Amino acid sequence: MEFTTLLEGIVARMRTAPDKGRVADYIPELASVDPDQFGIALALADGRFFAAGDADTAFSIQSVSKVFTLALALGRLGDGLWHRVGREPSGLPFNSILQLEHEKGIPRNPFINAGALVVTDAILAGHQPREVLGEILRFVRAAADDEHIHIDEAVARSETDHGHRNMALAYFLAAHGNFVNSPELTCGTYFHQCAIEMTVRQLAMAGRFLVGGPGKPNLISRDSVRRINALMLTCGHYDGSGDFAYRVGLPGKSGVGGGILVIAPGRASIAVWSPGLNQHGNSALGTLAVEHLARETGWSIF
Ligand code: DON
């Protein structure tokens, strides 16, 4: 397989795609991102690396960060985490509060906002946000083998100023006794983890710990690798998870910054970025691009 040609071909196709989606604007700092950007990177299990397009432009990873915090939480709490959050697709938008009322404050899964807030709350557990953010950054930097990964303070502040919906979710969780820290503290930590900025190069490198097999950064157990991939496949794209599995056939986690981390188990970690989103809040061209890549490589797990 000629990966350079494949990725360059995908970039060329995406440049002329008719529908680039819409950039997220509920976090004002993200609304000003140029929608005409596209980058893709591929870290193969054998150590080879390929990238094309805007592969060196940093973007806000947003909900892709939920994969890293879930990995940390599983490492720390093990199966105890599942007393506080479920493992089923929600079939509702990422920021929905609806099911929480009927389901006793137990979010459906760790990737919708309510579930991710519980995960962050669990790793915060009485520590200072600064310490926990340091731990999250250390994990991401170790995974990517790159010390130059930072939090964009302007994005974190922008979400803090407009994050009423997440605050509402946090208070609702607290009302159900499913919150350890104050909603302000956990939301503040969560907004900062979401504001980590990375390039597709860094993100593809960081995803290698989920590929499995020898030679990858050994940050979590083999069981956790399998389980996180299963959750990415079933819940990683919220109410668009079925469509992503149908079109791409690989575990993936999206973010409203337009990034997607996709894992081809045993083969590769793939990162793609294009800021325009589809109706589910997932990158429109990012999805199209990995659909194309999965078809050309035959990497679908099905
Ligand atoms: O909590 C939020 O709304 C954002 N910080 C993250 C949401 C997100 O990335 C949804 N994914 N596509």
Image (spheres, helix red, strand yellow):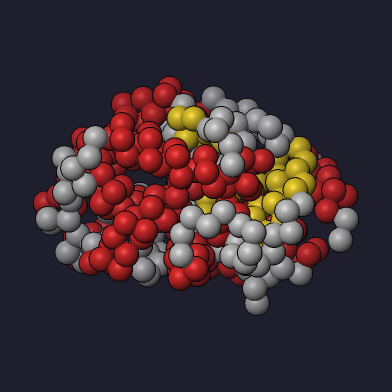
Query: Based on the displayed image, in which of its 4 quarters is residue 57 positioned?
Result: top right
* Horizontal relation, residue 122 to residue 277: left or right: left
The quadrant where residue 80 appears? bottom left
Is 77 situated left or right of 66 in this image? left
The C terminus: image quadrant: bottom right
Residue 10 to residue 79: above or below: above
Q: Quadrant of residue 22?
A: top right
In this view, the residue in front, 190 or 288, is 190
**Residue at (45, 50) in percent of width and height:** 68
Q: Nearer the viewer, residue 44 or 175?
A: 44
* Residue 210 visible in the picture: yes
Which percent across, then down, holds residue 23?
55, 36
Give me the residue at 52% from left, 50% from top: 254
Q: Quadrant of the N terminus?
A: bottom right
Q: Relative to 170, does residue 82 appear above or below in the rendering?
A: below
Task: Count the marks.
Answer: 0
What percent of the width, then of the height, locates residue 47? 73, 53
Most extreme residue toward the bottom is 302
Relative side of 91 to 247, left or right: left
> Residue 290's spot in the image, x, y percent?
69, 56
Q: Does residue 82 lie above or below 270 as drawn?
A: below
**Is residue 13 among the parts visible in the rendering?**
no
Q: Identify the residue shown where x is 11% and y is 51%.
A: 175
The x, y position of residue 264, in whole percent, is: 65, 64
Q: Residue at x 78, y 64 (%)?
A: 297
